[in-house]
Amino acid sequence: MNSKVSIYRDVLRACCSGDWRRDPPASRPDFDPDNKRTYEDTGLKRCGASIVRVKNHMMAAKLLAEGPNPKRNVLREPHRNVVILWGQSQLCLSSMRPRQPQPSDLTMIYPGVFILFTEYVEGETIAALARSLGGVEEDGARSITRQILSGVEHIHRQGLIHHDIKGENILISSTGCVKIADAGMTRIDVSDARVLASPFLAPEVYMTVDFDCAIDIWSVGAVIVELLTGRHPWADASVAFLLLKVMPLLSAQNIT
């Protein structure tokens, strides 16, 4: 058994035994999102985000190339199973470290790039965990799912739909605490073929633009499949195959 598999098995045991319930609540770092002197880029990346430091406190900083979203911070109450958004800024991520801007920088393409500063979760995604273990046994999957549903319920009570629940957007800490990332940060663009080819997307999204929070519950079901098997639904299907299946639905509803 390699070391990573051994670590994942320890994480699952901690999750099932409830060790995560003893974790102290996350506290907001003392920093100003608009003042890069109050935080430091470590140069490290994890799960698509840059890791920044405020004194001895770590945060994740993620690029979002879109306009201001007044509802992005409507998760008014923190929840143990949802990654907390600490702040947002229009500063360029490249400006966190003094260097000459590069043509490849997102800031060169999207002048309105935002940085979202979120709680840092020291762990992996449940997709990586399930993939490494070749699937999670039923007790472990049940414990993880219970925490996912607790986080989803909280998001819905705040009047939000997550829109993008999948194994890669759900983190699990070393103590077995499951946290949903990107709450309130995602919108579904039905004109984007890459989005519509997601195996976690509920079918009503293809048929109407008037969907509700039930689409997140469908996505949780797809995540459970991923947990139990180590592979997402339609893992053997190509993007072209998935689009071939959904395009007639789009055409029938005049969405395309």
Image (spheres, grey):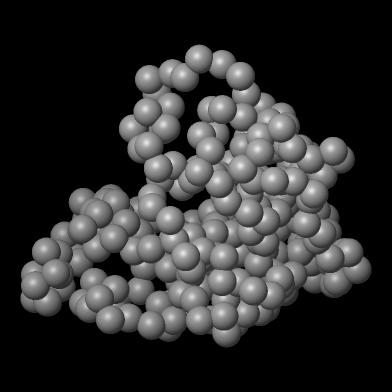
Q: Quadrant of the N terminus?
A: top right
Left or right of 168 in this view: 32: right
- The answer to whether residue 9 is visible is no
The spot of residue 31 in percent (x, y) is 75, 46
244 or 28, which lies in front? 28
The spot of residue 37 in percent (x, y) is 71, 32
Residue drawn at the location 61% of the way across and 19% of the way down = 98
Q: Is residue 102 above or below residue 147?
A: above
The spot of residue 113 in percent (x, y) is 44, 42
Residue drawn at the location 16% of the way across and 60% of the way down = 244
Q: Quadrant of the C terminus?
A: bottom left
- The answer to whether residue 43 is visible is yes
Residue drawn at the location 66% of the way across and 34% of the way down = 36
Residue drawn at the location 61% of the way across and 29% of the way down = 96
Q: Count of labels shown?
A: 0
The spot of residue 38 in percent (x, y) is 74, 37
